[in-house]
Amino acid sequence: MVCTICHSHCESDNEQTFRIVIRDDYEALANIPCTERNMFNQMSGLNYKADDRRYVFDVYRGHEATLIGGDDWTKFKRDFDVGQGNVVVFDMTGEQQRYMWLELRLKKREELLKKLLQLMKRKRLSMMITGLKMH
């Protein structure tokens, strides 16, 4: 379910993992879930490594929302072909942060849940999945 405060998917049972749903292919900024805002209190940038590529996402902290964006966010989305309907999951544990993203353009909800569970088992992630809407 989408949060009315930050317009993101806030629910998670893991404080070190959060997800961002890409709503538009051309979206220049992405909302950080409000439950994760405190992690970004003193940050002006998020230094992130994915598949041996380094990205520095700009962090914009407003009164009601925290956003990431910038040239490297655009480059990250282009490098990994991330677009509308995808979910980017950020894992902030350990010395090096990791990411993954899921294709949500599946026709059946059961198919989506099966893929998510397989990925979570393979990556040893624990996330709460609720309120998914299929197009």
Image (cartoon, rainbow, N blue to C red):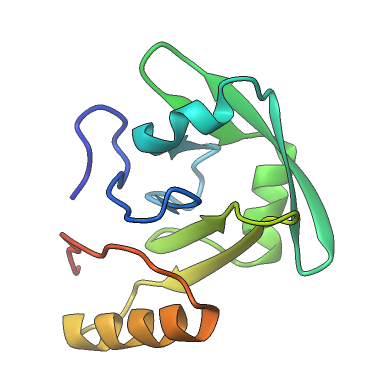
Instruction: Please indicate whether residue 70 sits to the left or right of residue 91 in the image.
Output: right
Q: Vertical placement of 43 versus 52: above or below?
A: above
Q: Give the image location of residue 88, x and y in percent.
A: 49, 59
Among the 4 quarters of the image, the one containing residue 3? top left
Q: Describe residue 30's horizontal placement relative to residue 53 as left or right.
A: left
Q: Give me the residue at 69% from left, 23% from top.
A: 44
Vertical placement of residue 8 versus 80, above or below = above
Residue drawn at x 51%, y 46% is 26
| Front position in the image: 71 or 15 | 15
Q: Front-most of 27 and 132?
A: 132
Residue drawn at point x = 43 percent, y = 48 percent: 15
Residue 60 location, x and y as percent?
A: 57, 22
Which quarter of the figure has residue 69?
A: top right
Q: Name the residue nearer the viewer: 21 or 75.
A: 21
Count of marks placed on residues: 0
Residue at the spot 55% in from the left edge and 37% down from the top edge: 28
Where is residue 73? Give x, y as percent: 65, 45
Q: Considering the image in quadrants, where does the C terminus appear?
A: bottom left
Instruction: Please state the horizontal and vertical placement of residue 121, each as a whole percent of the image.
Output: 44, 84
| Above or below 63: residue 7 | below
